[in-house]
Image (spheres, helix red, strand yellow):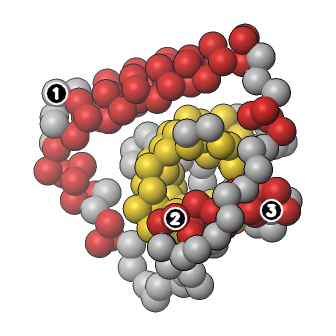
Amino acid sequence: MLQNLQQRYAPSRRLGKERRTSPRYPFTATCDATEPKSGAKIIGRTSDLGRGGCYIDTIGPFPPGTNLVVRINRENQTLKISGKVIFAQPGMGMGLAFADAEPDQQAILDHWIAELSGEPVAKPEPSSTNSEVSPSAGSKVSENQSLYVVNELILLLLQKGVLTEAEGKSLLQKLLK
């Protein structure tokens, strides 16, 4: 069963010419993605990041073509940016292409990319959402981090074959309700 899952979701299954216009760098951070019309939301983590987009590890990705608002949380900064799902791997994650960002958000993205690539750049100002954190908002961050850890645990159990695909999906759907 696990071998079948690994074959189905192997990165080599993505065929075709590389379409990225900027390099991607390994980058792990918690994130959430929301479809603005329905309000549907997933929680995941990034595994890579570039100026043009990112990959989000999540068991229940949105389908290709879906427009999203993504919030990527790293240390004391949050990047909020619009994007579009370019490809999705059920049970694994999705690749996003970023849309234009607000200037303050673009500065955060540029800073992160500079850190990852070794480019020199000035540190951006913290976004207003982070500088106005209330005590109740801090507990929400902890709740999101807890959901992220449980999500990661379920994915790990799936990868090790401890859970079946159906069991994993069921648990993740309950977690994200």
87 and 127: which is toward the camera = 127
Vertical side of 154 occupied by 58: above or below: below
Q: Amino acid at mark 1?
A: Val
Q: Position of residue 21 (x, y in %)?
A: 59, 84
Q: SS of the residue at dot 2?
A: helix
8 and 86: which is toward the camera = 86
Vertical side of 94 occupied by 1: above or below: above
Q: Position of residue 175 (x, y in %)?
A: 49, 20
- Give the residue drawn at x 46%, y 61%: 48
Q: SS of the residue at dot 3?
A: loop
Which is closer to the viewer, label 1 or label 2?
A: 2
Q: Position of residue 37 (x, y in %)?
A: 84, 42
- Label 2 and label 3: CA atoms lie apart by 19 Å
Q: Which residue is mark 2?
A: 115
- Label 1 and label 3: CA atoms lie apart by 41 Å
- Label 1 and label 2: CA atoms lie apart by 37 Å
- Tag on residue 101? 3
Q: Which residue is mark 1?
A: 162
- Give the residue drawn at x 28%, y 62%: 10
Q: Amino acid at mark 3?
A: Ala
Which is closer to the viewer, label 1 or label 3?
A: 3
- Badge 3 density bin: few <14, some 14–19, many ≥20, Cα 10 Å: some
Vertical side of 42 occupied by 142: above or below: above
Q: Residue furthest bottom?
A: 17
- Badge 2 density bin: few <14, some 14–19, many ≥20, Cα 10 Å: few
Q: SS of the residue at dot 1?
A: loop
Which of marks 2 and 1 precedes in the sequence?
2
